[in-house]
Amino acid sequence: MPHNRGMSSTSRAPNAVVRAFAECWRAIRYLVIGGGTALLAMIGIIGVVSMVAFSAIGVGLPAVPEAARLLHRLTNLDRRRAAELTGTPIPEPHHPLTGSLGERIRTVVTDPATRRDVVWLLLHGPLGLILLALAIGLPLGGLNQLAIPAYWRLVPGGVPGALDFQVDSWAKAWASVLIGLTYLGMTLLLPAAARGHARLARKLLRPATGVRLSDRVAELTASRAAALDAHGAELRRIERDLHDGTQARIAAVIMQLGIAEQLRGRDPDAAFGLVRKAQDTAMDALAELRDVVRGIYPPILSDRGLDGAVTALAARSPIPCLLALGKVGRRPAAVEAAAYFIIAEALANATKHSGAEQVTVGLDATGDTLVITVGDDGRGGADEALGSGLAGIRRRVDAFDGRTELTSPVGGPTRLRVELPCGS
Amino acid sequence: MRVVIAEDDALLREGLVLLLNTAGIEVTAAVDNATDFRAAVAAERPDAVVVDVRLPPTFTDDGLRAAVEARRLYPGLPVLVLSAFVENSYAAELLADGAGGVGYLLKERVGRVEHFLDSLRRVADGGTAMDPEVISQLLVRRRADDPLSTLTAREREVLGLMAEGHDNSAIAGLLVVSDGAVHKHIRNIFTKLALVGDEGGHRRVLAVLAYLNAAQGS
């Protein structure tokens, strides 16, 4: 816009001032809230020290995973704040705490992110408090110093100025103005301090270089092994079903028809009876084949897609089932089948064990991930170690490198949440 | 009776034509995809249609969709749907218009020729023919306070046969009991399930199916 050039050059200066002011304000807010988390960090340091002491004599050990969770939440506060200031998200580096108590304690102790979290507490505790003092002291102190010439004579004996001197003369009052300007000048440096702090947070709180990648490799290796295992088990099951059921029955049909052929001259009635029997056997074979097909890939999935198939599942549920279906569209066949079987298994579990009055099934997609939730208002207490259904669900999910979360306190409610990645 | 058949498997299609012709039923068109089926129904205006659920062009539920659509275009057109597997929600879709004249059977039921022809005639007369597998899926016990659990074993049997679409004398024949006994069972069933309605005809079947579907869907 050439005709606007004159105007924009005059408005640029105020804009720059507004921007600098806004930036300072943002930095002050960041640093003041940081003072709060620094205080928490100080408390956290005391917590860590006492956890280590109590664990050394054994009594603290059972609380280690919970303490680690608190530590994660505390550092997550700073992760989120630093990410907000820098505009780059900081991924959480902690290994998930699952399994038995022993396994969870081992995870906490061996996770390098735990050590880095503690180092962060030690640094951020004092540093955050110092920055808090500066973020409040510099702007307010600066303004006070600027105002001293206006009021120093009203106070008998002078007012206390900066650097331990008493303002009791005009010279000192004007010197205060200079100091005030210096303070305000230093206030302009607060955004840089905030950025530096956020960069330090980023450096310490993100996954250590290489750790994240090696974690992923380990996870993918495990999920690939799980996928191979699951696939192998599936193939063996299908082979067994076909071999023991369908194949055996079709062989019987052929035999029955063969005998009928032999008998047809001598004893037509018996031959006719055998033909009828062969027909029955063939129908049984078909019924079994249908079950096998349903177990491999339910036909309704190809007819109606995942949402249609899940709607049919819900309609068939013996416990009244509420559906919350998002827009999921079509997904790779293997993922759709897995999602279908997971929901079917979860519903079957709820029916068998929960005593619930109502089940809720949710199916939605966030980006490339299918999110399945199945909840009921039953008696809870579902234990993966006991129920093979839940273990089966986890195996299926693991094969797709997905996530399974189960909460089922005794007394209920039970809630299962599964994330299934659909990407290749 | 004039019938249009849509079945993509050549062996089954020819078999059906032969079977119906032998029974004195005229097959005016036997097609192998949903598009031709729509055209054939429009051209022939048959007394009944026999349709496979899975048909070209998409090899999903084209046949079922075409059948439901045909019933919308020609209200009351008797439709007998055949499938390699039964899916309750499909049965519910076929029954949704409440007009009767609907059949939904597994393909292998064709092998019991007498039963199959009986089912087709029932459907053509505005009755119902539901596969026993559909009914057994609907009869799965749901909850402790389900009125269905108050039925005796015999009453459940009668209810199942009624839901499949059989009339009283057929049920009596199948269970080898007297008409009067069937009558009594049906009265008990209607009382226990708090169903109202006449005791005969396809309205009764629809009422029973609607009850089972509703109890399951809720």
Image: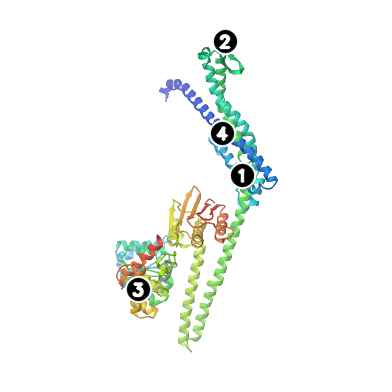
Q: Nearer the viewer, mark 1 or mark 3?
A: 1
Q: Quadrant of the C terminus of chain B?
A: bottom left
What is the crowding at mark 4: few (fewer than 14 residues within 10 Å), some, or many (at least 20)? Answer: some
Q: Amino acid at mark 3?
A: Ile
Q: CA distance from mark 4 to mark 3?
A: 75 Å
Query: Do marks 4 and 2 share a chain?
Result: yes
Query: Do marks 2 and 3 share a chain?
Result: no
What is the crowding at mark 3: few (fewer than 14 residues within 10 Å), some, or many (at least 20)? Answer: many
Residue ID at (45%, 86%): A269
Q: Is residue A332 left or right of residue B53?
A: right
Q: Nearer the viewer, residue B64 or A220?
A: A220
Dot 4 or dot 2: first in sequence order is 4
State the SS at label 2.
helix
Q: CA distance from mark 2 to mark 1?
A: 57 Å
Circle 4 sits on which residue?
A36
Dot 1 or dot 4: first in sequence order is 4
Circle 1 sits on which residue?
A67
Q: Quadrant of residue B8?
A: bottom left
Q: Residue A188: x percent and y percent?
A: 55, 24
Whether residue B161 appears in this view of the structure is: yes
Dot 2 or dot 1: first in sequence order is 1
Q: Looking at the image, is A154 positioned above or below residue B200?
A: above
Q: Residue A117: x percent and y percent?
A: 63, 40
Q: Is residue B205 left or right of residue A138?
A: left
The chain ID associated with circle 3 is: B
Q: Looking at the image, is A137 positioned above or below residue A82?
A: above
Circle 3 sits on which residue?
B186
The chain ID associated with circle 4 is: A
Q: Amino acid at mark 4?
A: Gly
Q: Residue A149: x percent and y percent?
A: 52, 13
